[in-house]
Image (tube, helix red, strand yellow):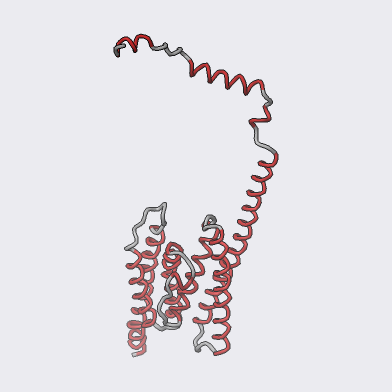
Amino acid sequence: MTKRSRSLHRRPRRAGSRTGQAQARAAAVSKGSGARVLPSDTMLESIETEVKTRIAKRDRLSEMARTLRRSSQDFMRRLHAEMSGAQPMPAQEKRKENAHHTALKVLASNLVRELERGGWREEEVAEAALQEWVEASLLLAVIEARPFPFPADLGVHAEAYLLGLADVVGELRRLAITALGRGDVDRAKGLLEDMDKLSGMLMRFDFPRSVLSMKPKQDMARSLVERTRGDVEVARFLNTFAPRQRKRSKG
């Protein structure tokens, strides 16, 4: 039998056979109980338990983050208050400061450990708190004239570290204003130079906003540098020309 004859003797395919099978399946489902295609109570209870567990974990992380953030802010306020004093910090106060920072480190470590257990899925809950922790630690390094710790030393990712680092510019400004209030223009000028250098370093980080929103902090850093520059120049002018003016008026 030739190829042509074999093709002529083939059984013709029934039109609409697939459509018929689909209709048969639909009919079988419609005849059965509707409960068979709906989720079971066991499944729903499992889903509910999973969501409640995640909510409870998120609430726990939020509370830990609030504690770390408040404690970090309080620590920085104390550092600035101590720096505003004319006398060096007593040894007892120095020990309290170190103990406070150690307690902050424990809070940060516990928070990071909780985040790691969840694969950092809830990192946005703790982002601001970790930034404050970084900022407080870097401010302490500035005051003690120590090298800045690395992100790994503080137990944070690079993103949180960079955002905290950007905020240090504002802390340097506060130190500069304190120095000007004491009449220490040279100290303020040195802090201004540090602000300018740090602000320039931050400009190298040009990431998409969806990855890391550095642009607002970079703009704020430049603004703070220029404002502080104006404050220092005014203070230098007053220190230089005001005494001369007083001498002339007396003469």
Q: Quadrant of residue 211?
A: bottom left
Compare residues 242 and 5 and report the one nearer the observer: 5
Task: Tell me which residue sits at (48%, 19%) in the image.
Answer: 18
**Split into 4 quadrants, where in the image is the N terminus?**
top left
Residue nearest the observer in this picture, 199 or 149: 149
Q: How many marks?
A: 0
Identify which residue, 217 or 232, lies in the foreground. Answer: 217
Coordinates of residue 80 in the picture (x, y in percent): 51, 77
- Quarter of image, res 100: bottom right
Residue 23 screen position, x and y as percent: 55, 18
Q: Judge left or right: residue 166 versus residue 112.
A: left
Image quadrant assignment for residue 172: bottom left
Q: Residue at x 34, y 61 (%)?
A: 205
Placement of 161 over or under 83, stated as above or below: above
Residue 15 percent across, percent down from the top left: 45, 12
Percent x, y for residue 148?
41, 76
Along the line of sight, the residue nearer the viewer: 142 or 244? 142
| Above/below status of 10 relative to 184 | above
Say above or below: 63 vs 76.
Answer: above
Residue shown at 62% from the left, 57% from the top: 57
User: Going by the image, does 181 lie left or right of 34?
Assistant: left
**Residue found farthest to the front:** 1
If the image is split into quadrants, where does the C terminus sit?
bottom left
